[in-house]
Amino acid sequence: MYYVVGYRKRVVVENLRSSFPEKSPAEIESLARKFFAHLCDLIVESIKGSSISEAEIARRHRYTNPGLLAEYHAKGKSLSILGAHYGNWEWVALSLPLVTRYKTHGIFQTLNNEFMNRTIKASRERNGMKLISTKEVSRTLRDSTGELITMGYIADQSPARTSRHHWIKFLGQDTPANFGYERFAREYDTPVLYLNVTKVGRGYYECTFHPVTDEPAKLAEGALAEQFMRQLEGVIRKQPEYWLWSHRRWKIKKPT
């Protein structure tokens, strides 16, 4: 992937240089190699996800504090759960329903190939998570009155050029923050948790919930996005190789 295929190698190196200007060329190259090794693991793990058993996914994608979800469930609160392209975020669809009484939901980016779309969606929904499109989020939240649900968002991706976004400093760069999850959390006043997925060994991860806010409706516009991105930046700086550096995160430039 690094030496032969060179998949988005230039994007990876440029993102690392911009995010860590204090690092030497040798350090940047080392981080890039580590990232590509992790990316190869992710590809294999994604394929394995189509057949992995419940017992195996529970062993390899372990939650350190699922009791936090039980506390909110006992209070009768639905939740917004923010994730990132860090560690193995794909396996959350398989592992999260196994550790909670909530009815779990996640957003699925529809593929152009209808066969692959059905196949991947069915695979990820095997353990009970309901995957929906971005257009279905508002209706799902509105119609869930009377039942407790979690709505999961991959919250670090770049927003569409035409959508509303909030500019923040992230990894030292002007970065447009996705605004959708904040709007929904504020509208339905759902407590917000950040789910950090840390790699502890090849094929093994620890998943930990971190509270972001219990009252998003009381926050100023953009404050939720800033709190989440600050938490994520702290995680990335500790172990940068496990974030998705091949993503063109800074393709939108801040107007001057």
Image: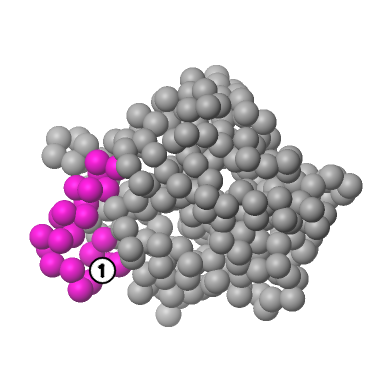
Residue 135 position within the rendered picture, expressed as x and y whole percent measured from the top left: 70, 45
Residue 71 position within the rendered picture, expressed as x and y whole percent measured from the top left: 72, 56
Image quadrant for the C terminus? Answer: bottom left
Residue beneath the point at 35% across and 74% down: 172
* Residue 197 part of the magenta segment: no
Is the residue marked by circle 1 packed among few (<14), some (14-19), or many (20+) residues within 10 Å?
Answer: some
Specify start and end residues of the magenta stretch as a single range: 16-38
**Camera-nearest residue between 92 and 76:** 76
**Camera-nearest residue between 223 and 146:** 146
Residue beneath the point at 74% across and 76% down: 218
Residue occupying the far left of the picture = 26
Residue beneath the point at 64% across and 37% down: 97
Relative to 43, say whether 84 is above or below: below
In the rendered image, is residue 133 in sight?
no
Please indicate whether residue 13 sits to the left or right of residue 251 in the image: left
Residue 56 position within the rendered picture, expressed as x and y whole percent measured from the top left: 48, 27
In the rendered image, is residue 197 in sight?
yes
- According to the image, label 1 marks what residue? 20
